[in-house]
Amino acid sequence: MFSKRNVTTYAIAFAFILVLNFLLPRMMPGDPLMAIYGDEALIAMTPELRAQLVERFALDQSLWQQAGAYFLALFQGELGHSYYYNAPVLTVILGRLPWTLLLVGTSLVLSTVLGIVLGLESGWRRGSRADRAMLAGLMSLNGFPDFFLGMLLLIIFGAGLGIFPLAGALTPYSGLSGLALVLDILRHLFLPVAALTLSHLASGYLLTRNTMITVLKEPYMLTARAKGLPPRILKYRHAGRNSMLPVVTSTGIWIGRVVTGAIFVELVFAYPGVGSLIYEALLTRDYPVIQGVFLLVAIFVLAANFLVDLSYPKLDPRVSYAY
Amino acid sequence: MHIDIKKEIKESGPGKTGLIILLLMIAAALLAPVLAPYDPAQQTTASLLSPSLSHWLGTNHVGQDIWSRLLFGARTSLLVGFGVGILSTLLGTIFGLSAALIGGLYEKVVMRVVDAFIVIPMVIIVVLVAAYIKPSISILILLLSLLSWQGGSRIIRAQALSLKERGHVAAAKSFGANYFYIAWRHIVPDLGPILLVDFICGVRRAVFMEAGLAFLGISDPTLVSWGMMMRDALSFSYLNVWQWWLVPTGVALSLTIIGLTFISHAAEPVIEPRLRGAEIA
């Protein structure tokens, strides 16, 4: 199903992101070249380069012509040049992307699955001691900012107990390969994933639990119970499947949250992904990189949301009648 | 719609806990100048001291008293939190209500924009904008509010749509009441609990965001902020300072957010009455 409403929503979101990315550096007081290219570029700046850049961005022309030049470059896949890394922005980002995808993907899957299972169990036992303990525990966990949770894990398991490495994504210059390399990567991945998963567990849990509570009151649950079905089947097949639906709708929003959470967690663990890249770019005022990452991450989150929206009516046909 | 939100919060265990935590934080923020033994910004040569009677939580790398900074940090956190809470609830109410009452093309446009902003990852935008404009505290409040009223306005609109069909609104209309009068006299009073929940969620988001931005180092460096304290503490974590520098700060921040989470969860049946009685049991 391809509803008009959906497409308009995403078109507006996309347009806003592009316009913001274009206008922000050009609205800053002072030299726009400086705002577009950052401090680092000024060191490398020669009159020839300056003239070339001014021409490329049409900076001596009207805002409309600048916009034209900007969008033309963008649609050719040109995200600009980082003077700090002395490489095209796209190359810099793509080099970091696999680590972030690994971190975000693992955490997203783990937190969603764990959240659903805990939510189902908790909602099923609503009001019991186990339910209340889980509710209070997970809500408290939710209050810990991901970067603080990361730092605590780092201090306890990394520095204190020495079980896990303190930083990075693999042991440098170790020359590992094959299985040993995979294990090394997993060992480095464990703490960052734990921090991200734990801090994002609560949303899935709370949503599943809430839905479970309302689903349990449905007449078809009474029927299933009357048929004498065992609790396991009732819980997971009848109530569980229906309780998962809102979780699917929210996955899109969560992808955005986990991705932004990754920025902070990567910084804590010095994990060499896009998040650390943003941080380094903020420190060095490498504006082309900040802008490039911003654009790619925003587009990625929008695309993920859009796919979730598209797939939802297939999972729950009732929705297609709602439009 | 007539659910007593005060009762709802008071009757739930976590709700009460949350309220107490929040009140303590507010007290710490208000009384900071009285409770703090030192000027939080005063730099001294006594840097990186361990906790002692004169410095309860020791001092940081530029010799500032950590306990005093912790107290003043509550001010920044709660000021940003409540500022954004008020402003974003106000914006959400204005757009949600007007969309519901005016309807037509206006409603369509407003709701499409709202939907669009809900799918945009807000943190990323705030980081980008903050990286350029280095926001002062008031600009930060404005920025966060502009980006966070949309979720609430959706709920407010949905509620207002059902409220405006009620008999008393129709009666008011038949006497020639205008939109503004109807909204203010007949709809806003019944929206009270929803507005409160929206406000609390706004506060929580803002407290979180302020700390996050300061942690990334892109907020006003002259402000005393928990996020910035944690960022500084992280860079000295190889000295055992985390015990009195990082952990108390992180715990203060987490407690504030947890308190707000508990309150908003206890008040949730206001939005979803089917959840009522879930915790009381």
Image (spheres, rainbow, N blue to C red):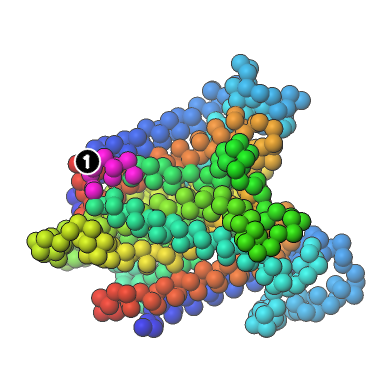
In the displayed structure, would residue A42 be above or below residue A164? below
Q: Quadrant of residue A225?
A: bottom left
A255, B29: nearer the viewer? A255
Residue B171 seen anywhere in this rendered image of the structure: no
Q: Which residues are magenta?
A: A125-134
Q: Which residue is mark 1?
A: B280
The residue under label 1 is which amino acid type? Answer: Ile
Please state if B47 lies on the left or on the right of B273 as rendered. Answer: right
Q: Residue at x 24, y 52 (%)?
A: A124
Q: Is residue A132 magenta?
A: yes
Of helix, strand and loop, which mostly describes the magenta segment? helix
Q: Residue at x 28, y 66 (%)?
A: A241
Most extreme residue toward the front, as rendered? A179
Most extreme residue toward the right, as rendered? A47
In the displayed structure, would residue B145 be above or below residue A79? above
Q: Is residue B255 magenta?
A: no
Residue A125 seen anywhere in this rendered image of the structure: yes
